[in-house]
Image: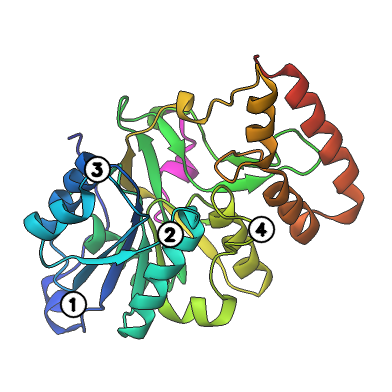
């Protein structure tokens, strides 16, 4: 695996005397046994000494649950329904983590690849800078050094009103002020590799599994937290490698059934209820119409 950029140093005296916070990683999955097992093997090697793993399985039929219990008996496995998707499954894990008294929740996907000191470095940065919400830098696993996201920013009135910050940019192309920062403020962020202080959920609530069951629930939750006065940050110093390619989000636009999926299936990033919820709650009223127009133009240009 590619090595992550160097993180902040933590003195041995500090490490020896500070109370180690409990981190609970919440991992939703469905029918991705090999990816999930690969992920759990990486997490089992984490150097942070107080780490719990909660996998929320959405009715997998490929033997995921049995394999986890056989190979990683220390991992808590919760069951979710077929229709709970990312937000509903993640909420189950968050509830369990909060009930168990965790200090931090780490939302992370089963296709993530992280270094052994990933959790320790995220915790060190969060504590050093007082971060209530801290997101990772996400790079493409297939091309280390090419950034998939360093947070998300809003661009109301455009066709991509939620835009992945620094998407497709090489690490070497980052401005010095960005590359050299330990943490940066963010408007929103993907939910893959986000360390969240437990009390934030008590202030903000859980992810909106009704209106945003899958895509955009992560960004909407962070935007909600920011509106309530919390500061969200991302770090360019700690890298999570994303085993993902853009074709995974390609929509089937060449048939009536495909169009129905595009606008009415929760696993589409253009799912109308989710888009409407984002616009209604967070878009300035004077920019809603121009944003909808831009989205319409984007749809007309999409490949069929």
Query: Alpha-carbon distance for marks 2 and 4?
Result: 17 Å
Which residue: 20% across, 47% down?
Answer: 63
Query: Alpha-carbon distance for marks 3 and 4?
Result: 29 Å
Secondary structure category for the residue under label 3 = loop
Q: Choose between 293 and 114: the one closer to the eye.
A: 293
Question: Which mark is first along the chain, 3 or 1?
Answer: 1
Question: Mark 2 against mark 1, which lies toward the viewer?
Answer: 2
Question: Which mark is first along the chain, 4 or 2?
Answer: 2
Asked if the magenta segment contains residue 163, the reply would be no
Secondary structure category for the residue under label 1 = helix
Residues at marks 2 and 1 touching, judged by CB atoms closer than 8 Å:
no
Residues at marks 3 and 4 touching, judged by CB atoms closer than 8 Å:
no
The C terminus appears in which quarter of the rendering?
Answer: top right
Q: Choose between 260 and 180: the one closer to the eye.
A: 260
Secondary structure category for the residue under label 4 = loop
Residue 81: image tag: 2
Mark 3, residue position: 62
Mark 4, residue position: 211
Query: Alpha-carbon distance for marks 1 and 4?
Result: 44 Å
Q: Is residue 128 left or right of residue 207?
A: left
Query: Alpha-carbon distance for marks 2 and 1?
Result: 43 Å
Query: Alpha-carbon distance for marks 2 and 3?
Result: 15 Å
Residue 140 pos. (x, y %): 36, 32
Say few, some or many: other residues with alpha carbon within 10 Å of mark 4 (under 14 / 14 to 19 / 20 or more): some
Residue 300 pos. (x, y %): 77, 20
Mark 1, residue position: 14
Examine the rendering and report whether any part of residue 116 can be seen.
no
Q: Choose between 181 and 87: the one closer to the eye.
A: 87
Q: Quadrant of residue 80?
A: bottom left
Which residue: 18% across, 77% down?
Answer: 14
Question: Mark 1 against mark 4, which lies toward the viewer?
Answer: 4
Query: Alpha-carbon distance for marks 1 and 3?
Result: 45 Å
């Amino acid at each position: 695996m590619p090595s992550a950029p160097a993180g902040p140093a933590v003195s041995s005296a500090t490490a020896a005397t500070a109370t180690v916070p409990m981190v609970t990683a919440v991992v939703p999955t469905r029918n991705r046994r090999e990816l999930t097992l690969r992920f759990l093997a990486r997490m089992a090697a984490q150097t942070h000494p107080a780490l719990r793993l909660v996998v929320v399985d959405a009715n997998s039929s490929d033997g995921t649950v049995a394999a986890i219990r056989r190979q990683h008996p220390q991992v808590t496995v919760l069951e979710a329904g077929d229709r709970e998707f990312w937000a509903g499954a993640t909420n189950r894990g968050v509830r369990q983590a909060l009930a168990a008294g965790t200090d931090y929740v780490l939302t992370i996907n089963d296709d993530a690849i992280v270094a052994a000191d990933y959790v320790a470095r995220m915790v060190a940065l969060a504590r050093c800078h007082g971060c209530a919400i801290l997101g990772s830098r996400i790079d493409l696993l297939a091309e280390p050094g090419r950034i998939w996201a360093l947070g998300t920013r809003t661009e109301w009135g455009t066709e991509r009103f939620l835009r992945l910050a620094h998407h497709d940019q090489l690490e070497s192309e980052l401005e010095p002020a960005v590359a050299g920062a330990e943490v940066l403020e963010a408007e929103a962020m993907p939910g893959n590799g986000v360390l969240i202080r437990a009390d934030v959920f008590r202030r903000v609530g859980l992810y909106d599994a009704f209106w945003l069951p899958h895509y955009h629930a992560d960004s909407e939750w962070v935007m909600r937290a920011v509106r309530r006065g919390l500061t969200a940050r991302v770090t360019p110093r700690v890298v999570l490698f994303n085993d993902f390619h853009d074709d995974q989000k390609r929509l089937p636009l060449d048939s009536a059934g495909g169009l129905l999926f595009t606008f009415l299936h929760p696993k589409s990033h253009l799912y109308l209820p989710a888009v409407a919820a984002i616009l209604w709650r967070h878009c300035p009223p004077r920019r809603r119409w121009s944003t909808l127009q831009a989205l319409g133009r984007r749809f007309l240009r999409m490949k069929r």
